[in-house]
Amino acid sequence: MDQLALLFVLLLGAVVSVSVGDRFGLPSPVLMTLLGIVLAVLPFVPNVDIPPELILPLLLPPLLYAAVRRTSWRQFAANRRPIFLLAVALVFVTTFSVAAVAHAVVPGLPLAAAVALGALVAPPDPVAATAVAGQLGLPRRLVSILEGEGLFNDVTAIVLYHVAIAAAVSGDFTPSTAALELVLSAVVAVAVGVGLGWGANRLMDLLGDATLQIGLTLLVPYAAYVLAEELHGSGVLAVLTCALFLAEYATDPDDVLTRLAGHAFWDIVDTLVTGVAFGLIGLELHNAIRTASGRWGEMLGWAGIVVAVVIVVRLLWLLPATWLTQRMHARRDYDEDIPMSWRETVVMWWSGMRGVASVALALAIPLSTDDGGPFPDRDEIVFIAFGVIMATLVVQGLTLPWLVRRLGVRADSEREQELERELAVRAAKAAKRRLREIESVEELPEELSEQLLRRAFEIGVRISPDMGEDERREGHEHRVRRLKRLRRIQAEMMSAARHEVLAARSEPGADPEIVDRVLRQLDVRSLK
């Protein structure tokens, strides 16, 4: 098996693992990691030959961009306090706690190298956390916090990591210089993200075509990451800023085709890249195992201690942080998503799985320092890092569904249905309001006006079928029955039309491009 065949196996596994995970209630990232481990021990599977410095630039931008598309800047702003406590403060606390313990238990490990170890194991993986949370049906407030933590903690951890690596390589470290680098990195990243977001938004207006616009969205996160890194900024923060800008300002409510195609495209990219990323984690395990040759007991002991520190620190931090956020929430009048019970706090604690970023940072540790000597205790750091990744990703990932069921933590489905119903009512009222405005300036036949009014009502019912119950109380029962019958008949008519057009594709003299164009128009019409 060569590298290309291995990539195909990972891509196929990424697709299959989603269905398998849904059927058995297991997170697909964990299944892909286990697949990678199985592949790594097979003798005919080659070692992965990807330069460590390319893992983050290749995998992280599309994963972050796909994750940001599911959220918004206002959601981050509303949850800034819990996100700050987790994404910034907790990363610092975990980094320096791990550094202190590792420096004490690993003989000869320099403090700068210990800080690098702490930084690379500090950030929980955003992809693993959101993928697991999405499958388990957790409350939306928990998913929002996990998404915010996962997206922003990489920024803090990666900057800390680079500062620590630079200090270990050069032997020179000053806290003031490190703080200045942290601030400058954030400023440069935000500037690059906003600038590229603004430029991409303008370019999308010029392109016009949905295919070209979606292709541009694939290039933008890579451009933001690379440009920010070239300017010594945070590539991760640049991608986040750019994606949030585009999500806020590059959405045209009337561009239906681009929005539908864009969602489908990014769902596919997210699934495939996530599967490859976690498959690589399992495949890279053999490199860490090779470093422990003859020192298994000692190095497993060190890894176990660091795993305990990572898990315990997260719990000890979450308990008072959640209490503090609840107190602040009670004193202020703002909508902020916070854990509302100790059960939700426990689920948040156990959701702190490490993943892609930690692997990439561990493998990217330099082999030598500026004076030509080997990087201090590199093998030990890589082994400990993989111990943390495997323990949190596999053990916590496989047991989190059981823990959620045991604690009875579930999404508030009634509240979600209520919000959906409210939006459906708002959409229908907006359509009716616009119809009245048109009637005030245009003379419409009574029959046409009545038909358009029914279409406005249909908009709301399509979004939330329960809305029809409220409308029936207002005398619309007969319209609801007629609407359901109309929708059924229209669906059968459109199905017949699509079958007929698709059959024409195989007829002699048929132009497949024209057939596909007509079929696409029918598909879009079917969604309206």
Image (spheres, rainbow, N blue to C red):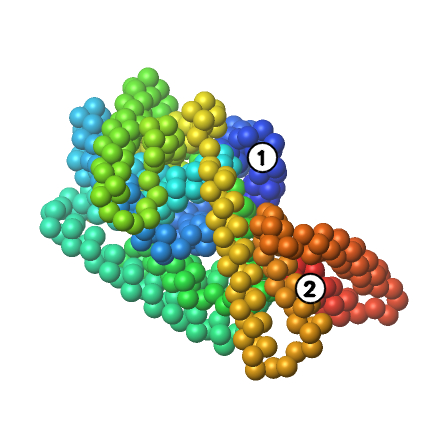
Q: In which image quadrant can residue 284 be found?
A: top left
Residue 241 in the figure: left or right of residue 259: left
> Contact, CB < 8 Å: mark 1 with mark 2?
no
Depth check: 514 or 298 in front? Answer: 514
Q: Identify the residue shown where x is 26% and y is 43%.
A: 329
- Looking at the picture, tell me which residue is in the foreground, 317 or 99: 317
Residue displayed at 29% across by 65% down: 191
Q: How many labels does the image show?
A: 2
Find residue 493 and report its image quarter. Answer: bottom right
| Residue identified by numbered label 1 | 22
Mark 1 or 2, which is nearer the eye? 2
In space, the residues marked 1 and 2 are separated at their CA atoms by 31 Å
Measuring from the top left, give residue 44's x and y in whole percent.
58, 32
Quick check: 228 above or below 103? below
- Quadrant (top left, top right, bottom left, bottom right) of the N terminus: top right
Q: Which residue lies at the image location 58% right of the left edge and 44% below the top edge?
A: 11
In this picture, is 380 found above or below 426? above
Mark 2 = which residue? 525
| Quadrant where the image shows the C terminus | bottom right
Q: Where is residue 68 in the image (x, y as percent from the top left)?
A: 42, 53
Circle 2: element type: helix
Crowding around mark 1 (Cα neighbors within 10 Å: few <14, some 14 to 19, many 20+) is few
Is residue 46 something that shows in the picture? yes
